[in-house]
Image: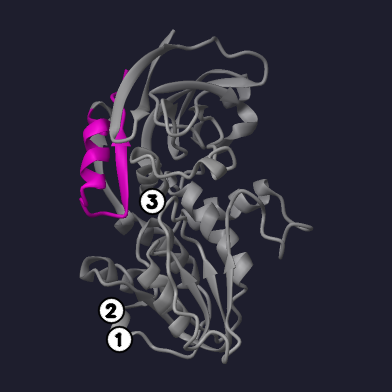
Amino acid sequence: MEARAYWTEAPGRGVLRVEELPEPGRGEALVRATLSAVSRGTELLVHRGGVPPEVAERMRAPFQVGDLPGPVKYGYLSVGVVEAGEPGWVGRRVFCLHPHQDRYVVPVTALTALPDDVPDRRAVLLGTLETAVNALWDAGPLYGDRVAVVGGGMVGLCVTALLGRMPLERLELVDPDPGRRALAAGLGARGVAPAKAAGGCDVVLHASATGAGLQRALELLGDEGEVVELSWYGDTAVSLDLGGVVHARRLRLRASQVSRVSPARSVRRTPVDRMALAVRAAAYPALDALLAGPTPFEDLPGLLDRLAAGEPGPCHLVSYASP
């Protein structure tokens, strides 16, 4: 049994490879992919070889094959149908943190079954929605808070979508791109340019992966407020001006990362619990506005090149031909 998979052979060069698949054993499932998605921030870092060597092992994807910078099979947003394996799973629609590949064999413990109200197109967002759930646990926004999300990419928009369903006094999505700002209204927020954003925030969640965005996030805080940093910069250095507001106003900056459940919930919640919340969030139809494409799997190498060159769109879908 053969499968085709996308590999980053070297920085800036991706190809499709054919590989042999084993038959599924006890506790395993053969999944036929229907859609996957490009996690723009992280996968473009991998595409250009921008992952620092000192964190390459820590940032491995769950079913990654090979080592960064390459050759490596990388990715983690895949949706498909179980074709064979454990009888109770055959025929079920599933999400898996698997690289871009048309068929794959994984343990059934790695699969998340999809309910009827979460279509395949929206289900590819589950990995990002799980990141957003963890970020809100880290940030801990309270009733009536003034909150801003700086950066309207895939992560920032998913965070905004969850925050938009909370009883906040104010929620702004801050981004210099008018197209991204326009998505805010459908997610329960107000889209604003960085210069127009309101200050005095209790919490700011930063996801622009730029030094300018992080600087603006700090400036938007009220006294003793906190920025929760969701960006991964890879090998890009970031400079901040900390002399103006940070020290005198006792501002805080902390990182949020999805590989572990937030300390605010880790005693009482597991990764399975967190994913279950992401599945519930994926039933929200407004999230469809984040999706672009699909691009045929055969054209994925070209899509990565176009995204690296600046093609817009927060979440690009990849489609797989039916058998």
On the question of residue 95 being in view, the answer is yes
Instruction: Tell me residue 271's x, y (percent).
Output: 66, 48
Name the residue that disc number 3 marks.
41
Rounded to the nearest angstrom, the CA distance separating label 3 from label 1 is 25 Å
Residue shown at 59% from the left, 49% from the top? 275
**Amino acid type indicated by mark 2:** Ala
Q: Which residues are magenta?
A: 299-323
Rounded to the nearest angstrom, the CA distance separating label 2 from label 3 is 21 Å
Label 3: how many residues lie within 10 Å, few (<14), some (14-19) or many (20+)?
many
On the question of residue 121 being in view, the answer is no
Q: Secondary structure at mark 2?
A: loop
**Amino acid type indicated by mark 1:** Lys
Query: Is 120 on the left or on the right of 31, as rendered?
Result: left
Name the residue that disc number 1 marks.
196
Q: Quadrant of residue 210?
A: bottom left
Closer to the camera in the image, 123 or 102:
102
> Do labels 1 and 2 touch, CB within 8 Å?
yes
Instruction: Tell me residue 195's x, y (percent).
Output: 29, 84
